[in-house]
Amino acid sequence: MTSTGFEHLLRELTPQVLGALVRRYGHFDACEDAVQEALLAAAQQWPRDGQPDQPRAWLITVASRRLTDMSFAEEARRRRENADALEVPLTAPAADAAGARDADDTLLLLFLCCHPSLNRAAQIALTLRAVGGLTTDEIARALLVPEETMRKRITRAKQNVRNSGIPFRPPPPAELPVRLAAVLQVLYLIFNEGYTSTDRVDLAEEAIRMARLTYRLLPGNGEVAGLLALMLLTHARRAARTTATGELVRLDEQDRSLWDAFAIAEGTTLVTDAMTRTALGPYQLQAAIAAVHDQSERTEDTDWVQIIALYDLLIRFDDSPVALLNRAVAVAMVQGPKAGLILLEQLETDPRLANHHRVEVARAHLLELAGELTAARASYLLAARMTTNTPEQRYLNKRAARLQSRADPE
């Protein structure tokens, strides 16, 4: 096995092994330390002695022994004597054979990372650490947070989970929809964090990997399929989203020959299948909108009427500011920029859009389409001042400068 294949295998097995140990022992910190030591042992022994027939079982066995070495059983006994709520077996697990509960264990780990006692920032960090297999330093660099700050955030998250009184077990059936919704939102937030950046593509790819994993665990869930499809259909445009110098390129100006046809085909198939066999949900509808964009060979071929209809359905589930803004732009593509601008004026009373730079971005775009270049330039400049995203600021200022040259030609 190549070094790349070896690293991929360990990365895939890590959440399975950690989930198995957490399910059996219930102590996240100790289990995580034990898994890291088992991975280190594998990195040292497998290249020399050969990969075992059941690598996951090998890792679980070695990690369980490490737990014993760390006197975990004694700690668990003391916690039990102190009436701790966790009731878990203290004997080391036997090596898992084929058909072991790797799916359940990994899903348990996802639910644990999206524990109700944690805020979204902590859920994202813990998911990247436990399921994504990223180090604290990698997470800190990906999220542009100092390493020490991220270390404290992860430590605090583990403490909050431990002190919450909610055990390390699969949530009861009544809580599954809420907990799964949190898992999907965290994965989508991770994806957006990577996709909207010009230099963190690995974070978006990691989100896609974890979404694939979740889909394998829950193939019958339409919203899980919808989220994976949405990620694939969005990420398919990655190569055309920026220039060689890192400048943003608007969707209608992108070179569509650079889009990933295989990802588009996979995402379209996923969302089409989900929408025909399961109840509709917001991720499926967002994916369907992305599929309409991606399947159009040219911007002018885009089926905006269908996109408006899909947004109308989406808003029934989630009338988010972004959905409302995007629907206004879609209406402008069908009925003209003036119609879109009227909708934007109506949205200005929505408190969720107060001081939101995307309102000015949409306004600038529609004003530009309407030929009102001076007003469009002012909106681009205002949007640039309102956003904190540096690449977006550069893009908006450049759009404003381009309009200035068109309005005042030499």
Image (cartoon, rainbow, N blue to C red):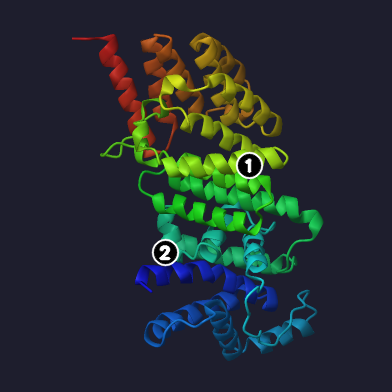
The total number of labels drawn is 2
Q: Amino acid at mark 1?
A: Asp
Q: Residue at x 65, y 74 (%)?
A: 100
Which residue is under mark 1?
273
Element marked by disc 2: helix
Residue 248 visible to an observer of this rendering = no
Residue farthest left in this picture: 410
Q: Residue at x 35, y 72 (%)?
A: 2
Q: Residue at x 52, y 60 (%)?
A: 128
Residue 268 visible to an observer of this rendering = yes
Residue 46, compared with residue 203, is above or below; it is below
Element marked by disc 1: helix
Query: What is the quadrant of the C terminus in the image?
Result: top left
Q: Amino acid at mark 2?
A: Asp
Disc nearer the start of the sequence (1/2): 2
Q: Which mark is residue 186?
A: none
| Residue 316 occupies quadrant | top right
Residue 18, compared with residue 125, is above or below; it is below
Image x and y of residue 191, in percent:
50, 48
Image x and y of residue 197, in percent:
40, 44
Image x and y of residue 173, in percent:
80, 57
382, 186: nearer the viewer: 186
Query: What is the quadrant of the N terminus in the image?
Result: bottom left
How crowded pointer 2 is (Cα within 10 Å; few <14, some 14-19, many 20+) is rated as some
